Image (tube, coloured by chain):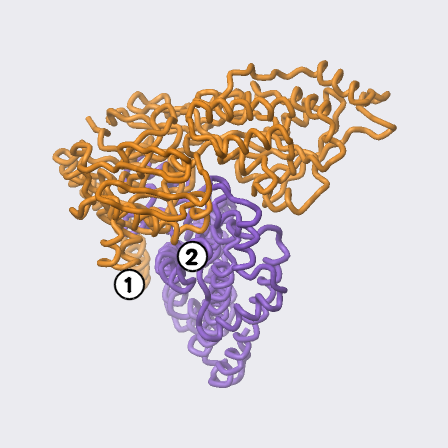
């Protein structure tokens, strides 16, 4: 297990390095720089000389590898630089927004689990019967509704029509209900089907048949025997979802006015705030690779066969 | 038995979830009830702005002035004319040395006296904090003596009063910053305005409460909460659900539902922005003025205002809104395909067998750049494309992500739809200098008209307000005569207001939103 961790840590460094060089290059290839935005040319009298001066100050005249090198040098000293727009250190900027995004992601996950587990269990318990059909329809609906539209409909229903929940804002429990649903609902549909498939697959295993022969009740078999085995593919996808949750929450963050990491990244991209974009990519890169490592390690806990070296982690 | 137990487990989970939701809802209800009870005693206003704020530094953002936290030395009145605010009067003999007499009855929100020394320190802070402010203020040195502030500029600079209207020059108590620290000050600046910061959550909301010692009289409302939300539909729904009293930048297509509600009012205010067409002077296709005149006649301004902007825009007749003191009263040009064809003929183009205009066997094909950041611009481009086709002019629309850079870095474009705030501070010199002079950052079409340059130069050294207005109007006439740009529409600002709000109206400049005169029923 320790060897896996070591191997993955090396992988982490390589992945993040390649990611940073790739995105830095892409950003430099994309047209535009933040100079006009920083100088607020839409409202302030700015001359070409002002632009040229700022461009030089920010080092945009230097070759790509020099700019990248300087940035990387900062990163190894744990300095991600300062945002061009706010002047604040990128690290502080991200740490201010991370809890908000994590809160949203946690809410989304809770909703996802709350919906997908019962739905998946019922579907697997009654395959082909009406509860399974209903769950299938719900999953289809959930997967096909875009989250921004679902979010708007939730706001329309609960904030505008019924007026029982606030339409936006962060802080209170009630403010997190709608965004959590908007985020969790579409995920839930995927996981409900995944869980159903996993449960049905493990039904065909010998130990389930043995349990059935011993007269163990169907619900018990489902919950205590098949569920654990069915979790393996679910957790694999879950690791991937966590990464997309950080980025995929953007629309929900903007609609519900949650100043999280996603909306920060979008703003940074629009204003070409390179240090913030790079910092964000670095953070999400490290996060995704770490989560996937944790997912792989969790196989050892869930499936004893892997621990004994008889299986290989997927 | 076990089966029943597990079913119960499942039932429990579901009931738990439902309960969780309902308690959340009911706790919200009781919260709202409690809030309503409090509201009866307290006069409170909730607003939603579309522009968010990462901090409340008045020298890098507009939120402090909009929310009544800070004030500037000079301001714009309802006719967009400059008047005194924290400065009572100002004078200059040579456009270099400026004497400002500041109000003697003003204190900062922390009780400190507002005087020339405080104003000087604040202006110095603003120049240090804002990259482009130094260039726009051109201050060489300042001297403070009691309530007399003397500013010396680096060159004769008649536009200084207009630049002191800029919210970035908001006056704050710099001494307070030293006490509470930079970070604390950025989240709760101490100004002279009618409202002081109660709490601030970056990019989310700011809560303010009234400054009972406000120099112009005690504010009528007790507190206000200003939220930021970038989604227009969500803002509209928050207004309809009465969650917000004032909502800025409503989506035009959702106004029908709001107007049906008798408690809500939609204010469509003429703004200071113009949507227009840029010509690339380096392109051989549009370098002939006859071609530009023809193109100008193919812009259906009326339809752009009525059909694209749904009536929430005014057809444009020049760079500045005709409501402004320096706006011109020329008639708005109407779509005239026949006249456009005649002008193209005069420019040497003839209609070929397939109805296309061509010169020396080459059809007139224009590349039109547009961008999505202002969603109406691509629609304006499309409408123009179809009208131009009627005159045999082919228009190819290219939608780019970053128009500013594309227009600078590429030489092969002919036209572009563009949008600019043409008079942000009650003066036309900002736009004339940035969009038409050789060094102007927004002169992407490389416009160089000697007559216009001369006018701008004269304007830059003239301080008499009447003379400045005349010169600005003259410049606008030259721009129209030379077809340096073609102005399409002046978009309105759409503000939704609950009828309980009294003694308040949104204005064109969008600077002074929360005021001490605003009241609620």
Report the residue marked by disc 1. Answer: B1
In what element is the residue under mark 2? helix
Q: Is residue B98 above or below residue B301?
A: below
The tag on residue A211 is none
Q: x, y percentage for residue A6?
A: 50, 83
Q: Chain of mark 2?
A: A
* In front of the other: A249 or A162: A249
Residue plotted at (56% across, 17% down): B332
Residue plotted at (15% across, 36% down): B42
Q: Are marks 2 and 1 on the same chain?
A: no
The colour assigned to chain B within the rendered structure: orange
The residue positioned farthest toward the left in the image shown: B41
The answer to whether residue B379 is seen in the rendering is: no
Quarter containing the C terminus of chain B = top left
Question: Residue B291 vs residue B300: left or right?
Answer: right
Quarter containing the N terminus of chain B = bottom left
The local crowd at label 2, few if under 14, some if 14 to 19, many if 20 or more residues have their Cα within 10 Å, is: many
Q: Is residue B148 above or below residue A34?
A: above
Q: x, y percentage for residue B36?
A: 17, 36
The colour assigned to chain A within the rendered structure: purple
The image quarter in which residue B136 lies: top left
Q: x, y percentage for residue B301?
A: 58, 21
The image quarter in which residue A47 lies: top right
Report the residue marked by disc 2. Answer: A261
Q: x, y percentage for residue B385?
A: 68, 27
* In front of the other: B390 or B92: B92
């Amino acid at each position: 297990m320790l060897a896996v961790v070591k191997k993955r840590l090396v992988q982490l460094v390589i992945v993040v390095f390649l990611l940073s060089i790739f995105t830095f290059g892409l950003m430099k290839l994309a047209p535009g720089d933040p100079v006009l935005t920083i100088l607020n040319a839409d409202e302030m009298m700015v001359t070409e000389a002002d632009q040229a001066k700022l461009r030089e100050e920010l080092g945009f005249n230097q070759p790509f590898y020099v700019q990248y090198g300087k940035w990387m040098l900062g990163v190894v000293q744990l300095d991600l630089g300062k945002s061009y727009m706010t002047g604040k250190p990128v690290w502080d900027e991200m740490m201010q927004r991370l809890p908000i995004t994590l809160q949203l992601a946690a809410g989304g996950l809770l909703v996802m689990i709350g919906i997908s587990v019962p739905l998946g269990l019922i579907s697997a318990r009654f395959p082909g019967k009406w509860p399974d059909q209903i769950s299938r329809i719900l999953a289809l609906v959930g997967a096909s509704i875009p989250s921004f539209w679902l979010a708007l409909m939730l706001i329309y229903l609960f904030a505008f029509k019924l007026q029982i929940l606030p339409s936006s804002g962060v802080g209170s429990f009630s403010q997190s209900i709608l965004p959590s649903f908007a985020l969790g609902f579409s995920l839930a549909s995927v996981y409900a089907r995944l869980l159903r498939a996993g449960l049905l697959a493990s039904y065909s295993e010998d130990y389930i048949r043995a349990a059935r022969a011993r007269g163990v009740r169907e619900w018990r078999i489902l919950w205590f025997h098949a569920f654990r085995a069915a979790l393996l593919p679910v957790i694999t996808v879950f690791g991937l979802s966590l990464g997309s949750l950080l980025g995929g929450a953007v629309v929900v963050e903007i609609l519900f006015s949650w100043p999280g990491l996603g909306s920060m990244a979008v703003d940074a991209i629009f204003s070409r705030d390179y240090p913030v974009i790079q910092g964000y990519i670095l953070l999400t890169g490290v996060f995704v690779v770490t989560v996937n490592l944790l997912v792989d390690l969790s196989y050892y806990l869930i499936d004893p066969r892997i621990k004994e070296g008889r299986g290989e982690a997927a | 038995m076990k089966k029943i137990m597990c079913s119960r487990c499942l039932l429990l989970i579901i009931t738990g979830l439902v309960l969780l939701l309902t308690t959340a809802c009911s706790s919200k209800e009781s919260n709202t009830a409690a809030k309503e009870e409090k509201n009866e005693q307290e006069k409170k206003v909730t607003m939603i702005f579309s522009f968010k704020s990462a901090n409340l530094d008045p020298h890098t953002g507009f939120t402090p002035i909009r929310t009544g936290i800070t004030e500037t030395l000079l301001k714009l009145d309802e006719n967009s004319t400059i008047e005194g605010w924290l400065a009572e009067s100002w004078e200059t003999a040579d456009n270099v040395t400026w004497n400002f007499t500041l109000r003697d009855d003003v204190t900062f929100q922390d009780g400190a006296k507002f005087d020339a020394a405080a104003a000087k320190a604040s202006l110095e802070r603003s120049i240090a904090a804002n990259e482009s402010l130094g260039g726009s203020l051109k201050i060489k040195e300042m001297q403070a003596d009691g309530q007399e502030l003397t500013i010396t500029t680096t060159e004769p600079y008649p536009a200084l009063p207009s630049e002191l209207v800029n919210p970035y020059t908001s006056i704050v108590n710099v001494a307070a910053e030293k006490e509470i620290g930079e970070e604390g000050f950025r989240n709760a600046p101490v100004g002279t305005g009618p409202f002081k910061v109660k709490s601030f959550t970056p990019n989310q909301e700011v809560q303010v409460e009234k400054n009972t010692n406000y120099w112009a009289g005690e504010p009528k409302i007790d507190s206000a909460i200003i939220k930021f939300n970038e989604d227009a539909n969500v803002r509209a729904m928050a207004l309809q659900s009465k969650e917000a009293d004032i909502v800025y930048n409503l989506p035009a297509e959702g106004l029908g539902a709001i107007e049906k509600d008798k408690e809500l009012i939609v204010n469509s205010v003429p703004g200071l922005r113009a949507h227009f067409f840029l010509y690339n002077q380096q392109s051989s296709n549009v370098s002939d003025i006859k071609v530009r005149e023809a193109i100008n006649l193919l812009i259906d301004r009326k339809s752009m205002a009525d059909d694209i902007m749904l009536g929430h825009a005014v057809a444009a007749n020049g760079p500045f809104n005709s409501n402004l003191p320096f706006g011109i009263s020329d008639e708005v040009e109407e779509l005239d395909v026949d006249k456009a064809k005649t002008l193209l003929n005069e420019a040497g183009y003839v209609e070929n067998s397939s109805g296309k205009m061509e010169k020396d066997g080459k059809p007139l094909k224009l590349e039109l750049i547009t961008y999505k950041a202002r969603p109406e611009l691509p629609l304006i481009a499309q409408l123009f494309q179809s009208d131009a086709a009627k005159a045999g002019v082919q228009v190819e629309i290219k939608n780019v992500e970053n128009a500013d850079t594309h227009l600078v870095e590429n030489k092969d474009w002919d036209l572009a739809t563009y949008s600019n705030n043409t008079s942000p501070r009650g003066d036309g010199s900002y736009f004339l200098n940035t969009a038409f002079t050789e060094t102007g950052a927004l002169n992407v079409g490389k416009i160089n008209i000697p007559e216009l340059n001369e006018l701008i130069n004269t304007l830059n050294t003239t301080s008499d307000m009447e003379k400045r207005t005349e010169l600005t109007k003259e410049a606008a006439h030259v721009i129209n005569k030379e077809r340096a740009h073609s102005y399409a529409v002046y978009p309105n600002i759409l503000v939704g207001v609950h009828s309980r709000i009294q003694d308040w109206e949104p204005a064109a400049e969008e600077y002074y939103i929360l005021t001490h005169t605003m009241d609620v029923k």
